[in-house]
Image: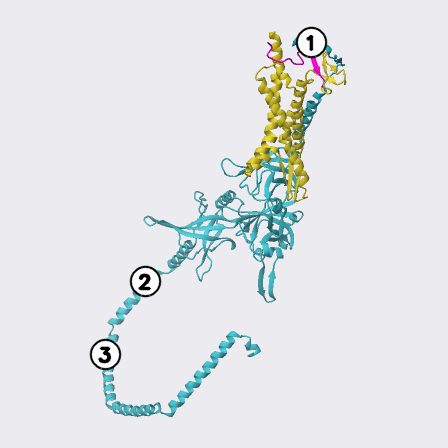
Chain colours: A yellow, B cyan
Amino acid sequence: MNPLPATARETNLLGCHDCGLVSRTVGGHDHLLCPRCNAALHRRKPNSIRRTWALVIAACIFYVPANLLPITHTTSLGHVQSDTILSGVLYFISHGDWPLALVIFTASIAVPLLKLIVLIFLLISVHRKSAWRNRDRTKLYRFTEAVGRWSMVDVFVVTILVALVKLGALANIDAGLGAVYFALVVIITIFAAESFDPRLIWDPEEEHHDARH
Amino acid sequence: MTQDTDTGAGALPQAVVAAKSGFSIVWLVPVVAALIGAWLVYKAVTETGPTITIDFATGAGLVAGKTKIKYKDVEVGHVTGVELLKDLAGVRATAEMAPGAKDYLTDKTRFWVVRARLAAGEVSGLGTLLSGAYLGMEPATEGKKQRAFVGLEKAPVITPDTKGTRYVLNAEKLGSIDIGAPVYFRQIRVGRVVDFSMEPSGRIRAEVFIQSPHDARVKTTTRFWNAGGFDVSLNAEGLQIDSESLVTMLVGGIAFETPAALAGADEASAGYTFHLYENHRASDKPVYDLKRYFLVIFDESIRGLSIGAPVEMLGFELGKVVDIAPFGSLKTGGFSVRVLVEIEPERYPDLMAPTADDANAAVIDAVKEGFRAKLATGNLLTGQKFISLGFFPDAPEAQVDLSGEYPVIPVMPGSIAEIAESFASIAEQLEAVPMQQIGEDLGRTASGLATLVNSTDLQNALRDLSTTLAEFSEVAANLNANVSPALTGVMDEAERTLGSVRKMVDSNSAARTETKRLLIELTETAQAIRMIVDYLERHPEALIRGKGD
């Protein structure tokens, strides 16, 4: 008995993303179109690994300036202070605002970093056709995808502050370049998570199964 | 199950084959990211200037990330960190400089903390009250490139691009002079006091900066004086108040002038040392700062020589006696008196060279030529002595003793020798006296006396004398008998006269009352005179103008 249910790939069938029509594959050809709505058909997300790699690498590059450059320039009484994400966290810690510091640290430093690490780990494990703890790895992926957008909180905070605090020479907050790179990191990692196909995690198991047959 | 699928699949439409696409566009994202990253790195490398460290004694006013470094009020860097030095002797500020500043960071570059300053008649750095202190920088292009600096504790008063010359003033006391105090020339402000410090000797060393072109007016003969406060003098023309300006009255200052007679002197070079006179009047009398000390050791009595006595050369005063102390041992005897003299070589520059060694060498040479110190009498009546320096070519050979603290100038025997000389001349005259003849004469006189005594004439004379005496006693007896009764009568007369006189001076007598009144009159007159004298003492002008009221 086959313990696993049959997959579309095993049965040489393809579902259309757009109209949902299921069609048969044409052997030897990768680039197929839906016979009904003419949308591109894919067995898996196309170039999932390569695309995810590209985005992860881009996010990694942007992660550096996002953390090194100031995200806000605070002007108060003619004195300008520039804060990076980390200096903001340290500022809140030094003022005893632990919960706020924890939120900013988690959302703006820990989560993007964890996301990048998890994606790299998944990519490498898929690349090596690892069959280790597939279910956990899928869970990890789901978690990554779900939590990623919350990193945008920091960007929104900066946006709102910049819009609200406009008191001329008395007090003024401007967004720094770091905010732009940080937003790019968050957006690119969201796309990277999106472009990763979790079905790839399970493919090695299928192949293994096939080989046993 | 497989069958079902097969059947279903057979019924499904077949997908259409699409044309192959080439390079995936998604790779553009990391490429762009990499390009942006590379650009950021390039920007960071080119736009970040050198990081330097500046050590200060205290961190007052230094805040990491806030304190700026400015030159001519333009920001050229900022402090990124302030930390204590390992030995806790100070603080080290780490600063990031603008990229353009790297050519100006040499071992001659100076940094200092600029704070608000309200001194010397002006207010500076008011902006620091609001924005906090900043670091001032004095860039220097020449010198060795350097990244670690030691900050100045005192902000320099004169910026390096100001043209002018620095001079040193030597003063007994600072007066009311502060750093930044003005320096005036004919009541025009031409410079400032840059720095002052205390010398190991306890004198004050002040540094002044005279701006160009006024520094050309500072000659080697120029006299500087303390113009702080004001001088009040009362003289025949009335009350006179002297002050350079209102500012100097409040914060003190220095003025200088070159006496017209000495204006032809050379211009003073940078760092030339002047004496700072206490006030304008004191500057008329030159004060000599340079002093050389010499010892003169006398074995003779120095009676009449006192501390402060002049040291002269051909009557020209060169210095004074500053100390007199005997030395020697009570047991062995051999007392001497050590006299410390102070010579001011500036009075006669040819006499002594400017450095102590040169001066010693000059004295050694001079002593070879017969240069000696001599105790001389200044005043014959009071016996005051002074020390005279001079050349005595006949003097016995001597050398300068340099072994002690002060060089010892050999002594030319002074007054003792004079006395000895005069004794000698007395002896010579005595020698000229014909003693033998006097002796012979005396002998002859004595023998004459002997013959006189033994002669019969003398015996006859004595006999005559005794008869004369007998006659005289007879005369006395006569007198006793005749004169005595008459004398008694005279005595009685006198007694009677005295009785009448007693009656006259009796308490109730008219004469006595008259005398009493006369005495009272006299007392009153005396009182009146005293009052007049008192009044005159207080109002001497009354002699001319009469008694006012």
In the image, which is nearer the foreground, mark 1 or mark 3? Answer: 1
Quarter-of-image position of residue B23: top right
Is disc 2 in contact with disc 3, using a CB cutoff of under 8 Å? no
Residue with the mark numbered 1: B6
Callout 2 amino acid: Gly
The chain to which mark 3 is attached is B
Q: Nearer the viewer, residue A158 or B412?
A: A158
Are the numbered discs 2 and 3 placed on the same chain, yes or no?
A: yes
Q: Could you say whether the residue bearing mark 1 is in a helix, strand or loop?
A: helix
Residue with the mark numbered 2: B439
Whichever of callouts 2 and 1 sits on the residue coming sooner in the sequence is 1
In the image, which is nearer the foreground, mark 2 or mark 1? Answer: 1
Q: Would you place residue B207 above or below residue A140 in this image?
A: below
Q: Could you say whether the residue bearing mark 3 is in a helix, strand or loop?
A: helix
User: Callout 3 environment at 10 Å: few (<14), some (14 to 19), or many (20+)?
Assistant: few
Q: Position of residue B355 (x, y in %)?
A: 52, 44
Q: Position of residue B402 (x, y in %)?
A: 45, 43
Whichever of callouts 1 and 3 sits on the residue coming sooner in the sequence is 1
Residue with the mark numbered 3: B463
Residue at 53% of width from left, 41% of height from top? B58
The residues colored magenta run: A1-16
